[in-house]
Image (cartoon, rainbow, N blue to C red):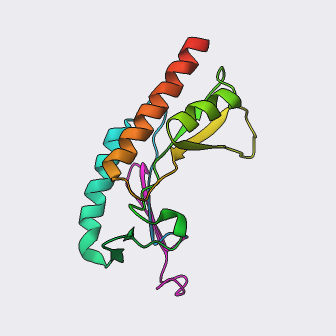
Amino acid sequence: MYTDWPAGRGTYTSFDRSLIIWLNECDHVRLMYRKEVGADFVKAYRTFAKVARRMDGLGRFDRDTRLGYLPFDIAGVGTGLRASVRLVLKAVGEPQLAAACNEADLGFRKVRDELDLPGIYDVFNRRTFGVTETDIVAGVVAGVNKIIDMEKKKK
């Protein structure tokens, strides 16, 4: 199905455009939940779980009993869950962000767009192998909350 462009690929969105599903773009399936400032991360995870359960009967996902799900990109072996949060940081600098992410076993990347605004970062889990989806979400939530607290204290 991966090579059957355009029949083997697609993008689907919810009516409010908060949930986006990409089929066969890079990963086999990519679910994205986009909300404005103050989005509820746990609600996003529950939405993903609900959608994944409904999609389960539509196709077969390769899963190894030892390695977990087998995605197109080897970096996603395991749960395959990449949970990320976009943050706008005006007071916390990149060195402090790097230290906080390292401590929480998270990664980050600077977001570059056409405006190239400063202080916009995606913060995400590094590990997908040997951890559960619940552990990933809890780790990202805890790490992001700590970074937000650092931002509030520096303002």
Dominant SS type (magenta)? loop
Answer with left or right where residue 148 lies relative to residue 113: left
The residue positioned 41% from the left and 32% from the top of the image is 142
Question: Taking 79 as reference, is 135 above or below it?
Answer: above
The residue positioned 51% from the left and 74% from the top of the image is 72
Q: Quarter-wise, where is residue 40 in the image?
A: top left
Q: Nearer the viewer, residue 76 or 23?
A: 76
Answer with left or right where residue 137 lies relative to residue 55: right
Q: How many marks?
A: 0
Question: Taking 69 as reference, is 49 above or below it?
Answer: above
The C terminus - image quarter: top right
Q: Quarter-wise, where is residue 88 in the image?
A: top right
Question: Residue 27 appears at what percent x and percent y?
Answer: 50, 69
Question: Residue 150 appears at what percent x and percent y?
Answer: 55, 20
Question: Residue 55 appears at what percent x and percent y?
Answer: 29, 68
Can residue 61 be seen? no
The residue positioned 76% from the left and 40% from the top of the image is 116
The residue stretch that appears in magenta: 1-25
The residue positioned 34% from the left and 74% from the top of the image is 63
Can residue 92 be seen? yes
Let me know if residue 14 is in the magenta part.
yes
Q: Nearer the viewer, residue 38 or 45?
A: 45
Q: Quarter-wise, where is residue 138 in the image?
A: top left
Let me know if residue 16 is in the magenta part.
yes
Q: Nearer the viewer, residue 65 or 16?
A: 65
